Structure formats: structure tokens, C-alpha cells
Image: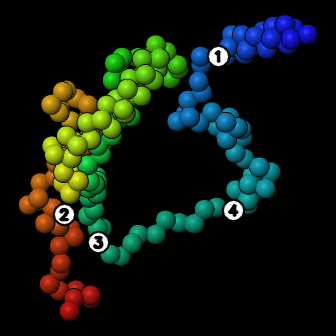
Amino acid sequence: MLDNVIRLGVATCLAAALAGCSQVENQWREDGPSVYASWESPTETELRGGGAPAAPRARDWPALVTRAADGRVSHFPLHFEDPFEDRGVEAISAREQYALGWEDIVAAPWSYGRHWLNIAAYPVSLIVTPPWTLMESDGRISRQLLGYDHDATRADPCEALTPPPGLARRDSGPNSD
């Protein structure tokens, strides 16, 4: 009886391991019903056919000039950063497919080992980059000591004291003192 239960358990585990699929759904690409379904309803069709759209109106004030935000994020040191977190599997491969592959098999023990190495070397990390060091990330992987690994770089302390363009205090205006 016990042998049959063990055999059944081994067969179930083996079947579950072999039944897995290596294709993972891409969570960043929309492929649900909202992409393929019709957006028009009978009510919408009736409302659109009922009348002409309003005439466009011109505004009577000048257009404003706007600029994109700086995009840099200030933070304190991330001592437990892993290149696979910043770059994904592109850290070791240029594969442009969203699926499980050999890179993920390499990344799992690498990340685990790197985490424990970071714990063991944490005192050294605190000396090299003290916890009060202001860092900034701009979303682009930058050149570091060991290559293009991380996004964070040391922030320029002089630049941190001056406000970004457009946020300087105005001398006149409705909210001036």
C-alpha cells in the first residue's frame, strides 16, 4: 500500500514537472478583450448619429510653454542592488523574447548568492557608500566600476541645492509675498 502511494506521488510530481510550459504571458502587453472587442454599443451609435459635433472654439489666451519633468529620482544608497533587477535577463543575453530560458536558470542562483555576499560585505558597502550619501537614478543604466550594472549614481550636492528650472521662486505674481 505504501509503495503504491509513493509511486503515485512520484508520478504526480513527475507529471506536474513535465506539464509545465516555458512560455510566460507578457504582463506588459495588453491582449485581453478590451483590445479585440468592439468599442461601439447601440447607444453610442445612436448618440453619434443624432447631431453634429460642436464647432471648435479658439482660446483667447496665449499658449503656455511647458517642459518635461527632470526625471531624476533622489534616494539613499541601495546596498542590495542586483543587476538582474535593473536590467533583467538582458544583463547576460540580448534575447528579446518574454519567456523562461537559460538566463533565468542562471539568474536564480546568481541573485541568491549575490544577496548573501551583499550581507557578508555590508560593512564594506557602508564604508564605500555611507548611508547618508545622496544618490539619484535617471532610468538609464550608467557605467560603474564593474561595467554597466546599475542606474544609481552619486548626486551632485551643489546641483541638489538649486531648484530645477521653472520651480524658482517668482518675484511677482498672484502668490508673491
The residue where tag 4 is placed is 51
Question: Given the current orientation, which residue lies at the most extreme bottom position?
Answer: 177
Compared with residue 123, is residue 171 higher up or lower down, i.e. above or below?
A: below
**What is the CA distance from the residue labelled 4 to the residue labelled 2?**
48 Å
Q: Amino acid at mark 3?
A: Pro
Q: Amino acid at mark 2?
A: Pro
Q: Residue 26's image quarter?
A: top right
The residue where tag 3 is placed is 62
Residue at disc 4, secondary structure = loop
Camera-nearest label, 4 or 2: 2
Q: Earlier in the sequence, mark 4 or mark 1?
A: 1
Instruction: Tell me if label 4 and label 3 are in contact, CB under 8 Å.
Output: no
Q: Which mark is residue 142?
A: none
Residue at disc 2, secondary structure = loop
On the rendered structure, is 176 left or right of 6? left
Q: Residue 115's image quarter?
A: top left
The residue where tag 1 is placed is 21
